[in-house]
Each structure stands twice: as C-alpha cells, then as structure tokens.
Image (cartoon, grey):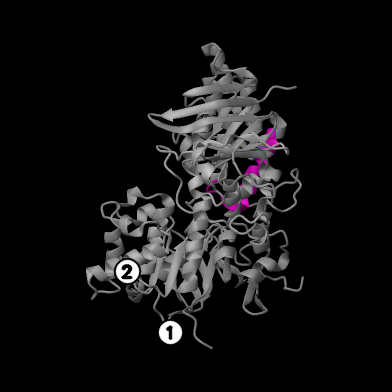
Amino acid sequence: MTALALSLKNAIIRYGRMTAVDGLSLELRPGETLGLVGESGCGKTSVARAIAGLQPLSSGELAIGGEALGGSPAARRRDLQRKVQLLFQDPASSLSPRLTVGALMAEPLKIRRTYSAESWARIAALAESIGLGKQLLPRYPHQLSGGQARRVALVRAIAAEPSIIVADEPTAGLDISVQGELLNLLRSLRDRLQLSYLFISHNLNVVGRVTDRVAIMYLGQIVESGSTRQLFSTPAHPYTRALLSSNLTVDTQRRGDRIVLKGELPSPHEPPTGCRFHGRCPVARAVCATTQPRLETLSDGRAVACHFPSETGFVQAMTG
Amino acid sequence: MSEALVAIEKLNVSYPGATVSAHVLDSVDITIGHGEAVGLVGESGSGKSTVAFALLGLLADDADVSAGRAAFDGRENVFATKEAEALRGTEIAMVFQDPMSALNPLFTIGTQLIDIQRRRFPNERRSQLWARAERVLAEVGMPDAPRRMRAYPHEFSGGMRQRVVIAMALLVEPKLLIADEPTTALDATVEAQVVEALRRLRRRTRSSMLVVSHSMGLIAELCDSVVVMYAGTVVESGPVKAVLRKPLHPYTRALLACEIDPYADFDPEQELATIPGIVPDPARRPSGCIFAARCTESHARCSEPPPHRQVEAGHRFSCWQDASR
C-alpha cells in the first residue's frame, strides 16, 4: 500500500483560550483532490495554515508522505514541509509589486538554492505551457490580468517541487468564463506532476465538480466526509443537507427543498455542549444537547458525526 | 396597458479619454414593470453596475450620458439629471455588495435605521420611526431585533449586516430596489437566508427590483426576467424561464455552459467549459457584433451590427442567427 500524501490526526489548534480546530483528522491520498468545505469561521483556513507549516498544532500529528513531522529532526522537518505549497486566495497580493514575473518565478528556486540554468529552463517551459510566454517575463504584477496573476502564483508554488498543493479559494473573484480554464489547468498539472490537492472553497458547485472526496467542517470539526458524488447525492449529516440545499444552481429543480437554517454560527469561544450543530439542527433531539456524536464510518464508507444521520439524503422529510 | 416603472431606451454612457473616449454602455434598453424583479447578468466589464449607477444618478461627473428615453414612474427624462438625486433614498434605494462600507461604524444600527427614514418621512416623530425600524428589522430575519437596534455594526456578522442594509433600503419604501451583488460576500447558508428574506419581502410589498449579479443561479432564484449584458451591450433579454430554457444568443449559451451543475451526470475527465479571449477594450469597440471575436459561431456577416430580433412575449436578442436554429 502506498503511503498517504498527507495525514492529520486529532489536530487541535488554539489561539489563546479559543479552540479554532478541535480534534480534526484528515487523510489526503496520492493524486487525489480533497475538498474542504465550511463557512467563514469554521477553521478551514487554520487547517490549511497548519498543513502548510505556517501555524503550529497545539496538539495532534501531521505526517507528510507517511513520515511524521513530530519525531523528525528540524532539517528533515523543513524538507518535508516544503513538499506542501500554499496557493493563496488573492494572488495579486501574494506577488511582490517590485519584482518582474521572471524574478517572481525564479525566487522559489533561489530560496531553495536550486537555481541553475536547467532548473530555470524547466520552470520557464512550465510557465510557457500554461500560457505565460516569454513576453510576460519582464512585466510587473500590476500589468497582469487576474487569470495571469493566478498562473504566476501557481508556477511559483510548483517551482518548489511540492507533492501537495493547498489551494485556498482558488476561484474566488474569477469570472465564470475563466474559472473553468483555471480548474482545467489545476487538474492537468495534478495529473502531469503527480500532485495531491487540498481544495478549500465555499463554492459548492466547483467542489462538487472537481474534487474526488470532500470533508465538511462545522465549528472546528469535521461533521461528514466521503466520496464527493456520494456526499452530494445523499448527504447524511443535517448540516451537509442544509449546506447543499442552500447552494444556488441555475436548475432550481435539481436540488431538494431548501432548508434555511436558523440563527448564526455559534462563537468558537463558547462552543455549544453536545453536538455543536444541535441549536440550529432541524432534527435535533434531547441527546444532541448533551452528548457529542463521534465521527463514525457508515457501511458505505463515509464518515458522519451525527446521532441521527439520514440514509436517504434529500428524500427523507426533515421538517415533517 | 399600464406603463412600466422604469423605461430606458438607448442609454449611452462614455468617458472621455486623452485621445479616444471609452464607450461603456452602448444603446442599452431596460424596462422594469411595477412589482417586477429584473436580473442584470454579465461578467466584469459588462457594464451592469454602470446601469445601476446611472439609475441612481451616481455616475462620475465627467461621464457623457445620453438616452433616447429615460422615464421613471410616468415622468420623462428623470435619470442622469438633478431629479435623479431627489429619487435616490426616497423612490429608489440601493443595497450594495459590501455591507460594512455601507454602515457607519460610529452609530448604532437603530440610529442609522432612523436617519435613513428622515428624508422620506420628514414629519414623523422619532418614536414612530424607531417602531417602524424595529418592525422591518424583524421582518428581514434579524433575531431579537429590539435589542439589536442598540448594537453597533461591528457587533454583527456579515449576513446580519447585509440584513441591516436590506432593512435600510426597505424602510424608505422605495418603488425600485436596486441590489448590486447582494449575496456575493456571504456564505452559502447565510446567502440562503438573505435570498429567503428578499423573496418574502417581494411577496409582501409591491416594490420592483433590479438585481445586478454575475450569478445566474441567484437571478434564477429571485427574478422574473433577465437582461444579459456583454461589453456594454444588451445581447439578450426575456423571462428568466425562457432564457434559461432556450438561450438564443451565443454569448448567453456560452455563459450558461460555464455554469457548473454538480448534480448533473458528468465525466470527471471532461474539461470544464470556458469562453476563450477577452472582453473588447471599451475605447476600441468593434463596429459589428460585439461578441464576434469570441463567438464560436461567428461568420463574415458578424462584422456588421447584428439585427434586434424578438421571439415570443418579450424574449429579445441581437444576433445574425435567427431563433429557429
């Protein structure tokens, strides 16, 4: 069996007294795209930062390519961590306005001291293959279109020779007519360079189309995970059902009846007792307020943290 | 036949440049009936926000504006004049994309919800205005509205702030509510709550709505009809259901093909649809069909301006191809 590209076990991330991520585990398999979905404040960006080595875990274990970082010497840890590259949400602000496109693309090589005529030729060829021709190299970031800036950021991430790319909202702010182009590009690079992606997005249409598996987060924890197709066709957790039902698609008949949640996301400073979703859940019963459900694997292979998971998805009436 | 609330014909907007002027709206027609919700859809640079700003009289001073007709509620030539300013905040209200920048951080929500009504109801007492504000805030789905009236904008989440802004717009009881990307900054479940609030209000009030968005999904959800814009031109317009079922302009078809439907059967190996090429420079608009350079169905005739065609009840498009294909 091949090693997992990345695994996170029982990760806890605290900021002061606030616990942003509470006992979260996830596995990224080689060559797959794993979607991480959740609303603002659920802790998904903290997870991304922890995986990229920008945020220390308060407890838990991160392993890259089957090697745990915790027990490794510092130098080895740094090498392992370089296998994970982060693709930022706002590409224009992640590019220094003082450097040309060429210098920006050479920078990761220089930082890693692997800059040579050959390594530069490889990066320039990669850039050219994704539509960043030689004529763009002397330009500055402000002279690029949004799509070009995203591709420069992508070349920079790939120049560090990662095996894992964490993409945080890669399509946010892109017009729908160019969004497909970026997603096609990400997929072809994944297959060509044997990358694995952690794909963080709140755009459920995109997640449903480009990810192989998906994990749904609510208030610092995973409430459901499984194959994307399974989860979209028969969501088992009431939060997943509400989230998917609120997704706006052109075909308004396709999704089930809309479940509009009441209230707001509770504060992570004082998470609710029992199941964290119980106060907004349309099917909560007494036990939900007192006992926290464990993430259990169902017979069909998906994992759900709910006392009363649905087995039929939208078909079952939730409010009746 | 009763006259439409908004009747705009041949609206042109251009900005003078050093050498050539940039033509950002070219002969735009928009009609909004009483109680009707119209969606204005297009990519960045399509001019959809310029249309909204023109209706509000908020275009920059150097904008060169002309229109064949610009009527609001039976009065002619009201837009893009001093009269438009009088309509703003009384008969036309706006919900902007970013609710934080629309609220003053120094005053409580209650104060702001009262101030917004002063222009519309100058003779009412503060207690009356306060009571109305409280009622409308509860109507847009704000839990515990009486207490939240005394809170400041920073104490609200994004979704709640957007509801405050919608409440502000509704308090002036406008004849026309313009919403520019009202849910773009919101999470999916919060977006559903805001959409629900807007729908509830549409059922209850007789306000007309203009929803400006790049999301066809939002427009399908909220609107009766849709106007599809590309590079400052209306390429297609008609009832939402008809346009979605049978898009007639190649640009509408290309745009709808880019929409991702995660519930459809798809082959994961298949590439996602895109529209190659870029929107033409507004200072160098082609003389023929504006979409020809990116159109997969273009031919020689497309170098001349395309005819305006009308098929069944109000479904219009501008293309050399006819609707029978």
Give the amino acid type for the residue marked by disc 2 in the picture. Answer: Arg
Quadrant the N terminus of chain A occupies: top right
Q: Residue furthest top?
A: A73
Which residue is tagged 2? B132
Q: Main secondary structure of the magenta part?
A: helix
* A11 in the magenta segment: no
Apparent side of residue B12 relative to residue A185 in the rendered image (left or right): left
Q: Quadrant of residue A301?
A: top right
Q: Is residue B62 visible?
A: no
Q: Earlier in the sequence, mark 2 or mark 1?
A: 1
Residue A315, how many percent across, how many down?
68, 55
Q: Which residue is mark 1?
A: B74
Residue ranking furthest to the bottom: B1
Mark 2: few, some, or many residues within 10 Å (few <14, many ≥20)? Answer: some
What element does badge 1 sit on? loop
Q: Which residues are magenta?
A: A172-190
Q: Is residue A33 left or right of residue B17?
A: right
Q: Is residue A10 visible?
A: yes
Give whichever of A63, B103 is nearer the camera.
A63
Measured in 3D between alpha carbons, the distance from the residue under mark 2 to the one under mark 1, in whole angstroms, is: 29 Å
Q: Position of residue B247 (x, y in %)?
A: 68, 67
Q: Residue at x 61, y 64 (%)?
A: B290
Q: Residue furthest front?
A: A286
User: 10 Å neighbourhood of mark 1: few (<14), some, or many (≥20)?
Assistant: some
Query: Where residue A303 sits: x, y (%)?
Result: 65, 36
Q: Which is in the foreground here, disc 2 or disc 1?
A: 2
Asked which secondary structure carries label 2, the reply is helix
